[in-house]
Image (tube, helix red, strand yellow):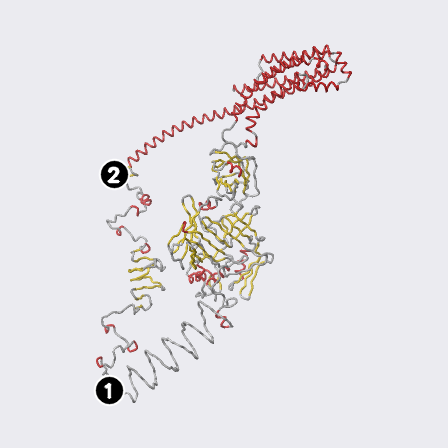
């Protein structure tokens, strides 16, 4: 994983709201924003179908740009993906690539690129002494390829690698380490292992997941060293098989120790992606069922198209089917020269049959060939029995015997020459032994410059043995035709340049030279020791040309007048009076648009005003604090009083119901025994009943009016303005088998979309830690926060706004998310969602508890129903168990039909006595019901009401006693029992009411 900031890690792991940008640098020109349509990166560290080591894969990169007409052939490409963190962007490099193909489609141009692995497609011939350290071998390989090595390897000493490409050789080095080789995101070659990183793939950031096979466990490692096979381990698991011509048993044992028992799961996943994640990383993966896996990223396809996505995979064959392939993901341009790419020298010594050999470089000690065709051959020594040469250019040739049809020889030195016919315009002969030679004008010392014997231009290089410089006349030596070189080749004068070289690099150029932007200039160019860094050129002295500490006070002109923006002002401010010995003097200092003294005065006034304001605010806060305390105390008192009143009313109703029930029983028994009297006295009873009913109806209206007003007042006090819980079934608890708890709130979000909301909940965990509080789905709650949790219930809250971010995913889960694999299991209860930005105490939704109905409707309805029930019961008692006057006739007829004739005779015999008693009973019961209803209406029993109730009770008792006395013994016993029960119930109710009133009074006074 590429190293990033903590802020990047936090932002990239948001499940929504991530924002990206991209840029690419091509030939030092930057393309970004809308100029980039799409980018794709494909990288691999394991190209085979199973786990492998020693892989050397080439990464590829494609980009689609708006076509600006620029030329990109063979250009160096450096792409970046950036993540917005607030207003800043943190860019992550994707690698360094070279364009290998361009294609224009409409207004776009597509660039296909590969990384620096192309530079390793050369044959490797080592110049080291062996056995050698693999660190030295790797450095030599990188030097020959022109790349940097960014890894420190184990100190293994191995034999020579011969006859392989640079790429294959670095693959062998990587397999010795049990690793793979790749080019990293900044273009350096590294040999590294799989690395565990702090990134998770979970159902929250996965789009698609396929687990392709069972878990793979490495149990055996096999190395093939030519015909020899080395192995260690057991056959009860997966195995790794690889080729390495320089492997040893000791190194193989280290590899086995490293991978024995190594586990991973083959899979393919598409997820939201992270540009810092690379092939070779190890991530934690959790599937939809909560199963956790150790996942390797063997291959990755990373895509940028305004946003990002990533497809990753790890491959694994079935048990005992793992193998090795170190060719890489890009086909190598040079395959093995034989089946195993055997050593070239050994192939010549033994035997090699090659139909077609293409080699970049070849070192051959001996070459036997029947037919050799060479376009160009540089041969130090050539021994040939016969050579047919169309055109031969030779600096020097030693020929034992030459048969030449025709020869054009500029300079011929021959010890013995037999020439049949010699035609020569000019001949210089020291001694001529020839009978046919005439030389009239030839004599020792007689050849003079003016004799004309030596023609103009006849003296060439061969005719001059040595020549003193003072013999030369003044003239021009044209450097375009001549190249002046020092003895060791470090100094050259050629063309319009004077060159001073070091290790075949022009360190100093005087004259015309080419700049980094491919333009030319004249002047002096001096490069540093690395042969690249420019110290001096036509633009002057560069930073590298100025040594540390070279600029002192003497180098700065008196009139330099260095601008303040060229100085490190922060450093000047820190150091100007560092030791406290100097004083800053000045007559005037400007701060903004005012002088320092004015600014300080203003600040002083502002501070004074702020002090006054703070004092005022403090007094206000104190007053508010006192008011809040008083309000809390008042609310507590009101709630307690309400509870007590409810208990009083409930106890009173139970007592009255019990009393009435017993009275009904007594009246029923009396009715059965006085049936004939009741039939004859219905008219009288109805008269009394109608009168009392009218009075009761009047009382009922008064009771309803009084109850409605008092109970409505109470309900209004209990109604909570604001703080209404919008979430149904919110008590929970909500749990999960893993570190994630999700609660669906889709219905709430849809109903209150685009509303500001506050969400709070009680949370606890099995241990102390942190959880993330946010939402999942196309709908969003508008916040993503971290909260501390403990093993005790803790109330957490956050404020946001319901929004829709994805039309295709209209759902929302409220999420409480701990770190996967941490063992931090969370439990949630008492979730509350309310409108606004303030969180109130937890209450259930009214739909769950019917709270509003209870406080605003049910209280009044129950009260009225209770009063109606009392009136009905009293009405029934007054009608002496007739039940309902509307059905009196039917009830009486039914009862009469069931009365035994003997009972009728007995009732008729006592009719005269029962008449008087029944009338008294009816009147007394009506009066008693009226008084009790009046007393129950307001919940208070005054002294006068108590006397009336007592008097009515006494009248009723007297009437009942008189009736009972005249009745049979059974009737007397039943009446007495009913009366006692009624009195006991009434007395108990009175005692309870009095006690509750005393309690309330005590609390009020206290």
Mark found first going from the N terminus, 2 or 1 = 1
Q: Residue at x 75, y 12 (%)?
A: 908
Depth check: give the residue in front, 394 or 916: 916
In the rendered image, the residue lying farthest to the bottom is 435
* Mark drawn on residue 440: 1
* Mark drawn on residue 587: 2
Q: Residue at x 26, y 77 (%)?
A: 457
Q: CB of mark 2 within 8 Å of CB of mark 1? A: no
Residue 865 at x, y = what percent?
60, 22
Depth check: give the residue in front, 590 or 779: 779
Q: Residue at x 77, y 18 (%)?
A: 900
Taking the image as shown, residue 988 lies to the left or right of residue 449, namely: right
Residue 544 at x, y = what percent?
33, 55
Displayed quadrant of residue 427: bottom left
Taking the image as shown, residue 559 lies to the left or right of residue 334, namely: left
Displayed quadrant of residue 385: bottom left
Depth check: give the residue in front, 864 or 937: 864
Circle 2: element type: loop
Residue 68 at x, y = what percent?
38, 54
Query: Could you give the CA–CA distance between mark 2 and mark 1, rounded to whole angstroms?
Result: 109 Å
* Mark drawn on residue 893: none
Q: Nearer the viewer, mark 2 or mark 1?
A: 1
- For the question of whether residue 405 can be seen, the reply is yes
Residue 844 at x, y = what percent?
55, 32
Q: Residues within 10 Å of mark 1 (few under 14, many from 20)?
A: few
- For the question of whether residue 957 can be seen, the reply is no
Circle 1: element type: loop
Depth check: give the residue in front, 603 or 747: 747
Taking the image as shown, residue 648 lies to the left or right of residue 379, namely: right
Displayed quadrant of residue 360: bottom left
């Amino acid at each position: 994983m590429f190293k990033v900031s903590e802020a990047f890690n936090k932002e990239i792991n948001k499940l929504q709201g991530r924002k990206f940008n991209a840029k690419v640098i091509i030939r030092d020109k930057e393309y970004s924003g809308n100029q980039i349509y799409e980018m794709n990166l494909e990288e691999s560290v394991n190209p085979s179908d199973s786990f492998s080591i020693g892989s050397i894969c080439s990464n590829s990169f494609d980009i689609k740009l708006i076509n600006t007409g620029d030329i990109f052939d063979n250009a160096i490409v450096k792409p970046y993906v950036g993540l917005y963190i607030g207003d800043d962007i943190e860019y992550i490099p994707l690698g360094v690539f070279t364009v290998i193909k361009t294609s224009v489609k409409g207004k776009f141009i597509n660039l296909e690129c590969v990384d620096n692995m192309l530079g390793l497609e050369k044959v490797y011939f080592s110049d080291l002494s062996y056995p050698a350290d693999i660190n030295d071998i790797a450095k030599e390989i990188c030097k020959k390829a022109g790349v940097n090595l960014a890894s420190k390897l184990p100190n293994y000493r191995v034999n020579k690698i011969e006859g392989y490409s640079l790429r294959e050789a670095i693959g062998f080095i990587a397999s010795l380490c049990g690793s793979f080789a790749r080019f990293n995101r900044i273009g350096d070659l590294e040999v590294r292992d799989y690395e565990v990183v702090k990134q998770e793939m979970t159902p929250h950031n996965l789009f698609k997941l396929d687990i392709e096979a069972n878990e793979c466990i490495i149990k055996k490692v096999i190395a093939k060293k030519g015909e020899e096979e080395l192995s260690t381990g057991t056959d009860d698991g997966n195995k790794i098989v690889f080729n390495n011509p320089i492997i040893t048993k000791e190194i193989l044992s280290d590899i086995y120790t490293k991978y024995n028992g190594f586990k991973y799961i083959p899979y393919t996943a598409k997820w939201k992606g992270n540009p810092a994640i690379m092939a070779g990383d190890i991530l934690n993966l959790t599937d939809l069922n909560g199963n956790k896996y150790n996942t390797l990223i063997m291959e990755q396809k990373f895509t940028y198209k305004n946003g990002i996505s990533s497809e990753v995979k790890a491959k694994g064959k079935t048990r005992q089917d793992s193998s090795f392939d170190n060719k890489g993901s890009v086909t190598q341009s040079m395959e093995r020269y034989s089946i195993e790419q055997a050593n070239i020298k050994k192939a010549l010594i033994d035997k090699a049959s090659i139909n077609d050999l293409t080699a970049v470089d070849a070192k051959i000690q001996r070459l036997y060939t029947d037919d050799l065709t060479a376009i160009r051959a540089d041969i130090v020594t050539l021994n040939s029995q016969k050579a047919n040469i169309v055109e031969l250019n030779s600096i020097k040739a030693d020929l034992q015997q030459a048969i030449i049809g025709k020869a054009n020889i500029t300079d011929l030195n021959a010890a013995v020459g037999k020439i049949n016919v010699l035609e020569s315009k000019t001949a210089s002969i020291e001694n001529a032994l020839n009978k046919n030679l005439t030389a009239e004008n030839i004599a020792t010392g007689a050849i003079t410059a003016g004799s004309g014997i030596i023609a103009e231009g006849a003296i060439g290089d061969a005719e001059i043995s040595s020549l003193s410089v003072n013999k030369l006349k003044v003239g021009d030596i044209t450097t375009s035709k001549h190249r002046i070189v020092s003895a060791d080749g470090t100094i050259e004068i050629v063309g319009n340049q004077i060159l001073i070289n070091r290790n075949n690099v022009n360190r100093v150029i005087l004259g015309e030279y080419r700049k980094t932007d491919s333009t030319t200039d004249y002047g002096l160019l001096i490069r540093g020791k690395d042969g690249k860094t420019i110290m001096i050129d036509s633009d002057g002295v560069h930073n590298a040309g100025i040594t540390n500490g070279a600029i002192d006070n003497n180098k700065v002109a008196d009139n330099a007048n260095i601008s303040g923006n060229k100085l490190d002002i922060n450093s000047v401010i820190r150091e100007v009076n560092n030791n406290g010995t100097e004083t800053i003097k000045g007559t005037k200092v400007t701060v903004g648009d005012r002088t320092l003294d004015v600014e300080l005065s203003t600040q002083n006034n502002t501070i004074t005003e702020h002090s006054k304001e703070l004092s005022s605010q403090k007094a206000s806060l104190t007053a508010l604090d006192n008011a809040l305390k008083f309000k809390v105390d008042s609310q507590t008192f009101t709630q307690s009083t309400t509870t007590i009143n409810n208990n009083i009313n409930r106890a009173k109703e139970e007592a009255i119901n019990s009393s009435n029930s017993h009275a009904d029983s007594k009246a029923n028994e009396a009715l059965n025994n006085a049936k004939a009297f009741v039939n004859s006295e219905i008219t009288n009873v109805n008269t009394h009943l109608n009168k009392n009913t009218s009075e009761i109806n009047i009382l009922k209206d008064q009771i309803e009016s009084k109850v409605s007003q008092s109970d409505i007042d109470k309900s209004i006090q209990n109604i909570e303005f604001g703080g209404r819980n919008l979430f149904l079934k919110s008590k929970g608890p909500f749990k999960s088998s893993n570190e994630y708890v999700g609660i669906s709130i889709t219905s709430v979000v849809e109903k209150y979309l685009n509303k500001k909301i506050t969400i709070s909940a009680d949370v606890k965990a099995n241990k102390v830690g942190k959880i993330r509080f946010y939402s999942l789905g196309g709908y969003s709650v508008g916040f993503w926060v971290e909260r501390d949790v403990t093993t005790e219930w803790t109330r957490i809250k956050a404020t946001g706004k319901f929004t829709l971010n994805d039309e295709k995913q209209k759902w929302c889960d409220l999420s409480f998310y701990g770190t996967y694999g941490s063992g931090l299991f969370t439990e949630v209860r008492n979730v509350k969602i309310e409108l606004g930005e303030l969180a109130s105490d937890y209450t259930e939704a009214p739909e769950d508890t019917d709270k509003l109905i209870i406080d605003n409707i049910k209280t009044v309805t129950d009260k009225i129903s209770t009063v109606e029930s009392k009136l009905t019961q009293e009405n029934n008692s007054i009608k002496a168990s007739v039940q309902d006057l509307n059905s009196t006739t039917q009830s009486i007829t039914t009862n009469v039909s069931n009365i035994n004739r003997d009972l009728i005779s007995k009732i008729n015999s006592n009719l005269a006595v029962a008449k008087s008693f029944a009338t008294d009973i009816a009147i007394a019961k009506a009066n008693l019901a009226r008084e009790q209803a009046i007393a129950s209406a307001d919940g208070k029993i005054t002294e006068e009401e108590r006397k009336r109730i007592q008097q009515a009770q006494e009248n009723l008792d007297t009437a009942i006693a008189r009736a009972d006395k005249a009745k049979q013994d059974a009737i007397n016993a039943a009446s007495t029992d009913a009366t006692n029960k009624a009195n006991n119930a009434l007395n108990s109710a009175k005692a309870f009411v009095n006690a509750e009133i005393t309690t309330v009074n005590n609390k009020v006074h206290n």
